[in-house]
Image (cartoon, rainbow, N blue to C red):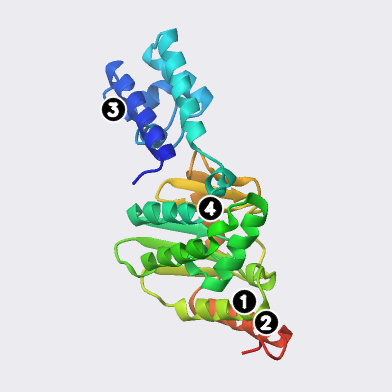
Amino acid sequence: MPTSFEKRRAELGDRLRRLRVDAGYETGKDFAKAIGWNAPKVSKIENGRQTVGDDDLDAWIAAVGGPPELAEQLREQLVGVRDAHASWKDKVRDGHRARQEESIAREARALRIRAVDLRIVSGLLQTPEYARHTLLAHARIHGGGQDITEAVRARMQRQQILYEPGRTIELLTSEAALRYPNAPHEVMIAQVHKLLALLGTPNIRFGIIPADVVLPYPVTADFWVVDDVAMVETPEGEHIASDADPYHEVADLLWTVAAEGDAARAVLLRVLDSLTRAAPPSQAQ
């Protein structure tokens, strides 16, 4: 089911759509032309796929001739949308399992999932032990470490979506994410083996950016785009972007330098060899 944030954003978008129609603009295209926007922007706002900005809301109100009391109501509603967008810390303070279950619900509805995780292996590709170390690291900063075992189990449940037809899944990581490990060598070795085993899985596009390529865009934070909702992760928390289009554009650029198929296998085998040689004898398996 939709999150509180998604529900509130959709409600605001629907209200803005009704105001637009009542003002005499029969189509979003007509309205966009009148206020100097592109039509897709109007559609995304009205359908709850993009959060309207303060200036955009003012322009909308002016275009539909809204009275001061309506303007105040809409601004309060926008504040409610933003309040519903809790930070990662707020979501996981009482435990990480609920956050993983939220992802299960969101991804089950999605037709397209794009993950750009250049600093960590995507949650949809993690082994249980890698996931455990990752979630424990988050808990040290954000709290909520009391249900890590349940959270790991939920994250593994999320991965069932990889084998369900009917959607496009693109998962992009980097060689650096494996060469700067966040877990012991034996965990990283098992993680690379899992990535190798997943190569060629139907419906999954997997790419890895080699360490020696020039990035076409300086990525400062990992992000996901689920349909038209972009989520950006920083140490402060997880944030939902107001517009997913720039993230699609960045993802497209990064895929131009990613290794796929046999080239990805070569990168992973190179990393595996390095990890194996660096591991203590008891761990190099």
Q: Compared to 6, does 124 lie above or below?
A: below
- Mark 2 and mark 4: Cα distance apart in space: 32 Å
Sequence-first disc among 3 and 4: 3
Q: Mark 3 to mark 4: distance in Å?
A: 45 Å
Give the residue at mark 1.
188
Would you say 48 lies left or right of 118 here? left
From the image, tell me which residue sits under label 3.
Answer: 27
Q: Check disc 4: other Cα within 10 Å, few if <14, some if 14-19, many if 20+.
A: many
Crowding around mark 2 (Cα neighbors within 10 Å: few <14, some 14 to 19, many 20+) is: many
Amino acid type, label 1: Met
Query: What residue do we see at 67% from left, 76% from top?
Result: 184
For the residue labelled by badge 1, is the local secondary structure a helix, a strand or a loop?
A: helix
User: Who comes first in sequence, dot 3 or dot 2?
Assistant: 3
Count neighbours of disc 1 (C-alpha within 10 A) and say few if under 14, some if 14 to 19, many if 20 or more: many
Sequence-earlier tag: 2 or 4: 4
Q: CA distance from mark 3 to mark 2?
A: 58 Å
Q: Nearer the viewer, residue 113 or 238?
A: 238
Closer to the observer: label 3 or label 4? 4
Residue 14 picture quarter: top left
Residue at left 49%, top 61%? 151
> Which residue is label 2 attached to?
275
Comparing labels 2 and 4, the label whose residue is closer to the camera: 4
Secondary structure state at the residue bearing disc 2: helix
Tag on residue 48?
none
Which residue is found at the position 52% from the left and 24% from the top? Answer: 54
